[in-house]
Image (tube, grey):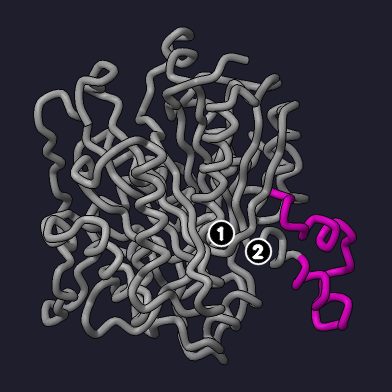
Amino acid sequence: MAVSSKVAITGIGAVSGWGWSAPALWEGLLSGRPAIRRPERFDIADHRTQLASEVPKALPQLRSIIPGWHRRTWADRYALAAAFEACRQAGVEGPLRGAGVFFGGSTAGMAEGEKYFKALLGRSSEGLRLHDIASHQMNGPGDEVARHFGVDGPVHTVSSACAAGGLALGRALEALRAGEVELALAGGADSLCQLTYAGFNSLRAVDAEVCRPFRKNRAGLSLGEGGAVLVLEPLERALGRGARPLALLEGVGASCDAHHMTAPHPEGTGAALAMEAALADAGLAPEAIHFINSHGTGTPLNDVAEGKALDRVFGERARRLPVTSTKACVGHLLGSSGALEAAATVMCLEHGQVHPVPWGRESEEVLEGIDLVLGEPRGLISQGNVPARALSTSFAFGGANAAVLLAAFSAIPAEGAGP
């Protein structure tokens, strides 16, 4: 296969607390309201907090599209639904020969494993079903996508906590540039489960209210679930087959804090290194970036560290760079968050506006130096033929960091014509 210099995104699919499609996610993001409420799938009465962003029930027509719906885990359903939507928009269908699947995740079928264990202990009226425990492995969602679409290339699953989705996009970008594959389905899927819910409550990392990224009185994150898939292919291939590129994936950077199991480096060192690596990978200067889709969890330590990382990378310009957080709307999707946030960033670039962060209480002050987009969408402004560009960042437990650099496709300049 030929080596590609530019990689286009020709399809996106998303499942979130706002529903089972990317348009549902976009409409929800633009509304400035959070899809974070009391979850109903399992009992949360004994936990400190009572909120999460739970995916609503799927419509019957969606269930009919995916074979064996009732045998799939929640994470598998999210992955397949997002992949189906993305492939339909991209105008591709299986079998996808010469393609690869690159997925991120953290819990996969854990919820189904919990259900099996509950039945095993006699605490459930449901009988033991072998597929509930056989399908809980981490690579399940990516493998299901590969089987459903007849993918005969590499199938990789990345599990680096909350950076996994972004790192999966990086692996896909490498494979396309090297000519290892001619098309990639990249993304991730995770579902809510009791282990995650109890774990983050035990760590006291969740807010009893809807999460408030970059507010001075923030108290923690809000958990979420869902998934996203992006169809990636060489730009020349996309144009040659008449596809409409939505955006370009220009660079991905990764780093490690090597600092602490759960806390970020207090100076944001690793986060800054990941952003700098993404810029270097794309051959761009910091001035080329028009906005940031931040990791933005709302935890006391992360938001300060991320603000310092932005100062390090962008200097004084960091105070004028619009910042948003998808997690404030649909919660933290853990291993699949980087994929969903990349999809949200693509839609921001495609529509020329940055989605807002829910405002909350009027008295809440924003951390100094952060130009947080609040309440209403903000229009993107780029000069001349220079496309709007954004960084979407993901910073994980264990100090794993990823940054994804995306560019609007419209008005892409000729080679060497600009930054």
Identity of the residue drawn at 43% across and 29% down:
9
Mark 2 or mark 1, earlier in chain: 2
| Position of residue 244 in the picture relative to residue 174 (left or right) | left
Picture quarter with the C terminus: top left
Picture quadrant of residue 281: top left
Q: Position of residue 392 (x, y in %)?
A: 36, 51
Mark number for residue 350? none
Q: Which residue is mark 1?
A: 335
The residue range painted magenta reads 113-141
In magenta segment, residue 126: yes
Picture quadrant of residue 384: top left
Q: Which residue is mark 2?
A: 107
Identity of the residue drawn at 54% across and 50% down:
167
Q: Looking at numbered disc 2 in the image, what kind of residue is underneath it?
A: Thr
Identity of the residue drawn at 41% across and 72% down:
37
Q: Position of residue 280 (x, y in %)?
A: 37, 42
